[in-house]
Image (spheres, helix red, strand yellow):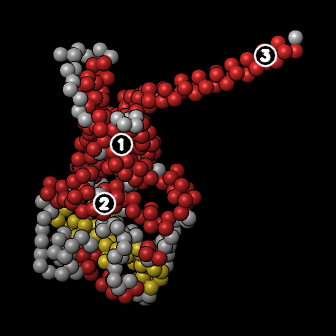
Amino acid sequence: MRIKRDKIAKYLNYSEHVHIWCCFMIFSLSWRKIARRVHLYLGISIGALLTLIALSGSILVYYPELDGQLNKLSVHSSNTINWDEAYATLKYKYPNRLGSWRLENTATGSVIPARYYKPIETKGQAFAPLMVWLNPIGTQIIRDDFWGNYFVTWVYNLHFSLLTGSTGTLIVGYIGIGTLILILSGLWAWWPKRGYWARSLKFKARSTKLGLLYDWHKFIGLCFILPLLVLTITGIMLAIPNQTDPIITALLGKIEKPTTTVIKPKNYILLSDAIESAQKAMPSARLAWIETPSSSNAVYRFRLQTTNDPSHRFPHSYVEINANSAEIISVFNVDNKSPATKVKNWLHPLHDGTIGNHPLRVLWVLSGIANALLFSLGLYRWLLKTRRINNY
């Protein structure tokens, strides 16, 4: 009887191992099917919104140039910008705007864009500054409008928040996380077995529309997978920084930010004198933005680009100047900051393509179009396969 009991126990133990092995084999055989299901359901559920975000992003790659063409802002002059004149013009034309102005240094001889960030007319909106353009010498206002009321800024709000403010920005961020899973699950579902790489990359001789749609979906996806991954990851981190900054901090350390000083106003110095002081503080940096004092704070704040800063339009070094005395208050040179700060500063120029100039920007435009094609091909194939539309 003891021998019989030992045989039964041995058999049960063996059966348990067989069961575990079978479960493992079933899972290992179904991973591709699981990936396809995830890819399909995510594509159907978020594909339309993702296409909207992607196509609007393609437009925004060249949005300053596009806005200039649409509104005929290609005014040029051979004269040097007179920043004192430009600031005086803003104060004269908008006497009730007592907050600070931000003036952009685009290029010598071109129009001067300026922003007033908290106009009473758009109070309550998440981001809707008054946008103003001055002629190249700063003596005349040639255009003004509120952010969101003209085409390129409407597209920007659509891309960044789906026209629904801060709640929409959160939604866009989580759509980005879904998109990341969508891309990786598609790659996972396609990933060929050993020895089948060459075959899996070819277009097969197809006699059915379903097969052709699959091949084109696969081809476009593989061609643009790296750009789409970069755009998705940077987009997520820009949209939901409160959720993603801790990841950067955990991996690379603290993200450092510039200080914001408040000083009681007395007698303001000229803007040109403040610029001279700021350039002495960082002599090799390029002036990008000027933030003027307000009625309650006597501080000039300058945003500058160092040679190592990837962002031309929105660089990350700052100099604060006391508007009462021209003394330097603080200098924030991004070149001397932590790796986490530098990585954070790469996100925006990488996402909008400006870091790679025209070649990367063109690739980013094509990537947005490719995203729309992937959704269209995938949706059409699913509708045919499930016989929701006729296969003519």
Q: Who is closer to the viewer here, 87 or 389? A: 389
Three-letter amino acid code at disc 1?
A: Leu
- What residue is pinned by disc 2? 130
Mark 1, mark 3: which one is toward the viewer?
A: 3
From this viewpoint, is residue 10 visible?
yes
- What residue is pinned by disc 3? 7
Q: Who is closer to the viewer here, 55 or 261? A: 55
The image shows residue 279, relative to residue 103, as above or below, that is below
- What residue is pinned by disc 1? 162
Callout 1: few (<14), some (14-19), or many (20+) C-alpha neighbours within 10 Å? many
**Quarter where residue 274 is shown:** bottom left
Three-letter amino acid code at disc 3?
A: Lys
Mark closer to the chain start, 1 or 2: 2
Question: In the structure shown, which secondary structural element does the residue marked by tag 3 occupy?
Answer: helix
Q: Residue at x 48, y 26 (%)?
A: 30
Question: In the structure shown, which secondary structural element does the residue marked by tag 2 occupy?
Answer: strand
Q: Quadrant of the N terminus?
A: top right
Callout 2: few (<14), some (14-19), or many (20+) C-alpha neighbours within 10 Å? many
